[in-house]
Image (cartoon, grey):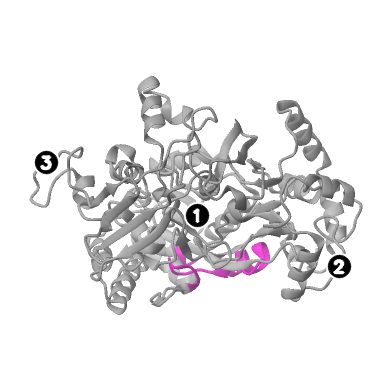
Amino acid sequence: MTARNGPTAVWLAVLVLAPAAVAIWAFQSALSRELPRADFVFNNGVEASSLDPAVANGIAEARVLRALYEGLYTRDPISGAAVPALAADTQVSPDALTWTFALRADARWSNGDPLTADDFVWSLRRLLDPRTASPFAAELECVRGAREFRAGVDSNGAPIDRATFDLGVRATDARTLVIELAEPTLHFRELLAAYPLVPVHRASLEALQARAPDSWSTLWGRPDTLVCNGPFVLAERRLQDRLRLAKNERYWDADRVAMRTIDVLAIENATTAFNLYTAGEIDWLDGTVPTSLVKTLVGRDDFDPTPYLGLYFYRVNTTKPPLDDKRVRRALFGTINRLQICDRLLAAGQKPAYTLIPWGNLGSYRSPAAKKEDLEGSQALLEEAGFGANGEEFGTLRILYNSSEQNRVIAEVIADDWSKYLELPVELESQEWKSYVDRQNRLDYDVSRSSWISDYPDALNFLAVFTSDSDNNRTGWRHAEYDRLIAAARKEADLARRDEALRRAEAILLDELPILPIYSYVSQNLVDPRVGGFGKNSLNEQNPKYWYWMDDAELAKSRRTVGKREKKVTSHGPKDGLYSPKSQAERKAGGRTRR
């Protein structure tokens, strides 16, 4: 199908392809829940595996947690910059080591309890405690004492008592939080906007742990037990169907929250999700767009792919022979046809990636020169490692990926490349999200589909993932000099010297290749043009606090501003009879049209 056949024809064609799937899904949903349509509905792609901010580790979880919780800082929906949230005022000492936050006096938990500085103290200590097993804990080693607190020993190697240890996080009164850093940290303000640093409600969590010591983590994600502090609360949870979020009337800025209800769906099938969007049952899709339709979608006012800080790559299990040989990993790296994946398969502006840092730069940082595709060189490397036509049998190489159409077709292309150019037998393994993550954590894979989306706009956020002690590493790769350079960069206050340490570290990673970069992301938000407060930023972070429905006048003004051609919209595109203006007005009546 050519890129410009016209969206209406494509929509109708897709609806004909799978109308039964949409009908069955809608029928089952109607039976399973007697709920009116939410003011806003988006597809999360998978079931959120955890609603514990300290433990969650994925985009699907992050989207929900940003609705349920709020920290000292959040992100502006348009620029993506870190902006104050619960921090009414921030003071930084001249040496940049002491940060003092005055909390909002009107901050409350969803059960009515006042939110205090002690809530942050307890939550940050919990995040750093190894028993929590937070994948984000290493990011807070910039805090004074955090490294010792995590290790359980002081700087002299003597055991510590974590309950009484002097960590650089304290409350001087109910509304004043002080965080002391071990060294100046250039990215600390950006770090404060990351979702793992939100507070959690101690009393309700500890009561649940006492009542159900073996199942509290599952029970905590239920509406009747989850106490939160964000613009929304969890009203209903139906596994493999949806989360229903409801406006938190006790939220300090509730008057600015337009949507009364939001449904978060867990539909993995891209075609089903797209059909529901086209039928008006979903208002936002992110990344679950059928790859076969992307070329036709580009140019519509509800689809505007934008580069953002995310990398799609494959992890390699470096503990498993022959993948423990970097020559083998280099051979795999050099035979991936990235241009075919980006231009012919994905076709939304993604760029072939050869470095860990997406797009090759981030702020002042520039990645080092990197290897690219090299078919003959890759074949020679594999033979040098003892494999190939006259060498040992390689054995079947298995690619693990989480279930999705896009992941499957990419894996098929790469499997074909490795089979064609390296003569390797390759098999594909598809797993639902939780099983896929569990297998990665256990290093129960050969090669595994992965991605890293930046928590904050800094090269360190990517490079620190692959240190030896990072819970996010999940490759088995360790390199002492790499670890030393990342540690030095964490402490470096001079930006140029910091960039150089990170560049040398990335050069090691690109030589060793425990990961195989494939492409740099673009956002693929397919979103109703009437949604206001929905931004295009480098992190593709969307905060539902800011969403609202534009009225006709504001929609027309928005289109003029961005230079879009005017056209009457009664659905997600040109009038095509899929649903009427009346039904659209009815479904949007719940969300306020202006703030």
In the image, the segment drawn in magenta is 332-359
- Within-10-Å neighbours for mark 1: few <14, some 14–19, many 20+: some
Q: Position of residue 64 (x, y in %)?
A: 55, 45
Q: First in sequence, mark 1 or 2: give its number.
A: 1
Q: Which residue is mark 3?
A: 159
Q: Closest to the observer: 385 or 108? A: 108
Task: Tell which circle, 2 or 3, labels the residue nearer the N-terminal end.
Answer: 3
Q: Amino acid at mark 3?
A: Pro
User: From this viewpoint, is residue 40 visible?
Assistant: yes
Task: State left or right for residue 197 relative to residue 423.
Answer: left
Q: Confirm whether residue 470 shows in the render.
A: no
What whole-number distance in Å separates the C-alpha atoms at marks 2 and 3? 69 Å
Instruction: Place residue 92 in its image quadrant.
Output: bottom left
Query: Residue most toward the top?
Result: 211
Identify the mark nearer the N-term, 1 or 3. Answer: 3
Element type at marker 3? loop
Horizontal side, residue 4 vs residue 476: left or right: right
